[in-house]
Amino acid sequence: MAAEPGLTAEQGVARDPSCLFCRIVAGEIPATRVVEDDIVLAIRDIAPRAPIHILVMPKAHIASAAELTDENAAVVGRIFAKAAGIARSEGIAEGGYRIVTNVGEWGGQTVDHLHFHLMGGRAFTWPPG
Ligand code: 5GP
Ligand code: ZN
């Protein structure tokens, strides 16, 4: 399979069979899929903390934002472009929204597969708790 510019072949096929989100990407565990292409998957969070709460993730397994390198630039760019498009289609772009990724224990990360929370439909406080 040809890799996208900026992506290695490994990044296009990498998968951790014990990872929850890899299993969702593979269709082994059901999820409400919002947007999907060859690189990125967006699903509705199973326990939404806002009226709109969508997780945007690479299909390839990357453990967290702490693992990102220059090699992942295209993946991250794609994720943010998708998030902006989803925000528009979900009707939250005008009011504003939040995109956040949690890293590690103190960051509150519970699933070790990079994902960005796209949250909207209500006002958020700053800083987060
Ligand atoms: P984290 O805590 O790692 O920043 O975010 C993980 C998110 O994944 C949480 O918001 C949690 O509700 C969501 N989540 C956990 N398990 C599942 C699942 O099986 N399906 C979906 N759609 N979301 C999940
Ligand atoms: Zn994974």
Image (tube, rainbow, N blue to C red):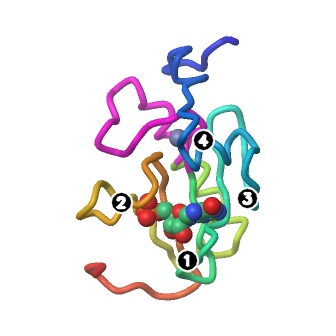
- At label 2, counting other C-alpha atoms closer than 10 Å, the crowd grade (few under 14, some 14-19, many 20 or more) is some
Residue designated by label 1: 120
Q: Measure the C-alpha gap from mark 2 to mark 3.
A: 20 Å
**Mark 2: C-beta under 8 Å from nearest atom of ligand 1:** yes
The disc, 1 or 3, on the residue closer to the chain's N-terminal end is 3
Image point 67% across, 65% down: which residue? Answer: 44
Question: Which amino acid lies under the numbered mark 4 shown in the image of this protein?
Answer: Cys
Residue 52 versus residue 35 in the image, above or below: below
Tag 1 near tag 3, CB within 8 Å = no
Is the CB of mark 4 within 8 Å of ligand 2? yes
| Cβ atoms at labels 2 and 1 below 8 Å apart | no
Residue assigned mark 3: 31
Task: State how far apart marks 4 and 3 are (Cα).
Answer: 12 Å
Q: Which residue is mark 2?
A: 102
Give me the C-alpha separation between circle 1 and circle 3. 19 Å
Q: Earlier in the sequence, mark 4 or mark 1?
A: 4
Which residue lies at the image location 51% right of the left edge and 35% below the top edge? 61
Numbered mark located on residue 22 in the image? 4
Who is closer to the viewer here, 88 or 62? 62
Say what amino acid the circle numbered 3 marks: Ala
